[in-house]
Amino acid sequence: MAATAGKLNLKREVGLISSVSLIVGTIIGSGIFMSPEWVLRYIGSPGASLLVWTFCGLLCMVAALSYVELGTVIKESGGEYIYILRNFGPVPAFVFSWTSVFVVRPASVAAMSLSLGQYTAAPFYGECPPPPAAVKCTAAASILIVTVVNCLNVKLATTLQNIFTFAKLVSLLVIVVGGILLILNGHTRSFQNAFQGTNGISSIGIALQQGLWSYDGWSNLNSLTEEIKRPEVNLPRALLISLPLVTLLYILVNMSYLAAMSPAEMMSSGTVAVTWGNKVLGSWTWIIPLSVVLSTFGSMNGTFFTGGRMCYIAAREGSLPDILSMAHVKRLTPLPALSFTAFIALILLIPGDFGSIVKYFSFTAWFFYSQAFAALVYMKIKKPHLHRPFNVPLAIPVFMLIISVCLVVAPLIAAPQMEYLFVVLFMLSGLLIYFPFIHFKLCTCSMDQITTFLQLLFEVGPTQSNLD
């Protein structure tokens, strides 16, 4: 960031390597170490679970193509928020920002922190599962550490992201190589009759939610388009390098898990990677929980880095309080937005568990992904004159729109729960905030006083867009 005309603006400092590191580092977090047992539990068989992981990777690659066009046509930061705002107006954009700030982003951070807490505490309790209190306290501490890092210095956050990305790739390669050696030595029992026990079609939607959770982060680069050097070149390159790499690693890691464990062992393991380490690495098994902790910490760091950007972009456009659009005048970090995200994530830790958080996170995330795909379909039909450095066929966003709607509807049919209704009601409750406080601007004077007080307290200033 840099100061210009009394305001702070974003500089284009993120190149191709940093873009790839951000995508890979954000995607590879807790999911691949936690979700395999859940995918297998919901889908029922090893063969079907590998198909789920493959399909999820291919689906995210196709989805990323649509996001490349969106990001190269609308070169503003903010991701889904800015695409919805520019095409469908401020009301649906506010509903997105309301839900994202209070549910989607904090839920993602909370789920990752719970995974980190599970793996950090597991070695201290031997064969027994760690108590929930220990897991949640560790998770809360990790959220606070990540928040402090991101609030202190942007360069420190990006440097740590690169280091953790390298560490997590090494840890996954250890699991992949170990799995290859096991398969070569004849550990193939899980792959015999691989599709036996596959559950019905009604379970596919929930299994896909768990798999897609592990790929989440593929769209995060669009949240900081204003900071990417030559986004029309580096955005597509970064996505086309990152997603095939992650998909291949995920498939091989799942095969390694299945080579070391029976399906029953995988489904009963609360920490599947630690169980794998106990069976394969022997006295070196401590490498796995350490790798998971570093990996999850890096993914949380990336989520905070991009999540803070989305939050303050929404505030900059008037959908959220002005204080969230500000950055620290000396450290040049979006301190208010990061602190607020951390506060909500800590609240979500109190009642939540990993499985339930992922279910409701995926439901809301793909609901808004569908709106982004709808925005691209709308732009292609209604705004064909726009310059498109990267142009995908209309069939791709239409296909993704259909798939994303199915991913939202499938859990409601397969396993209807009142919690989904609560999520929908929470989205709609944003309208009760929007019309009086955003549209009609009630309580403006008192909000201005609060903003001024917080601005002085946290030493933050307003920002402006960078579309050069």
Image: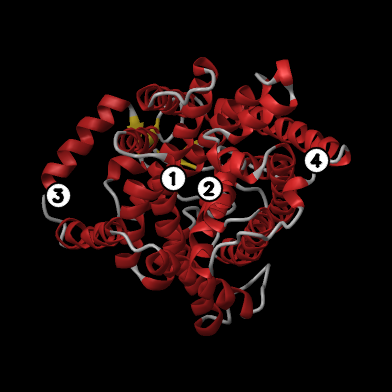
Front one among 136 and 24: 136
The residue under label 3 is: 444
Q: Residue at x 50, y 83 (%)?
A: 382
Which residue occupies the foreground of this view, 81 or 31? 31
Question: In what element is the residue under mark 2?
Answer: helix
Q: Is residue 413 left or right of residue 12?
A: left
In which quadrant of the rendered view does residue 389 lie? bottom right
The color scheme shown is secondary structure
Q: Position of residue 138 (x, y in %)?
A: 42, 22
Which residue has dot 4 on it? Answer: 187
Q: Earlier in the sequence, mark 2 or mark 4?
A: 2
- In the image, taking residue 427 as reference, residue 335 lies left or right, namely right
Instruction: Name which residue type carries label 2.
Output: Trp
Task: Determine the CA span between mark 2 and mark 1.
Answer: 8 Å
Secondary structure of the residue carrying tag 1 is helix
Do the numbered discs 2 and 1 sit on residues whose CB atoms are within 8 Å?
yes
Q: Earlier in the sequence, mark 4 or mark 3?
A: 4
Q: Is residue 277 visible?
A: yes
Q: Amino acid at mark 3?
A: Thr
Instruction: Tell me the CA gap for discs 3 and 1.
Output: 41 Å
The number of numbered discs placed on residues in the rendered structure image is 4
Give the residue pinned by disc 1: 355
Type of amino acid at the residue the image marks with label 1: Gly
Residue bearing the label numbered 2: 38
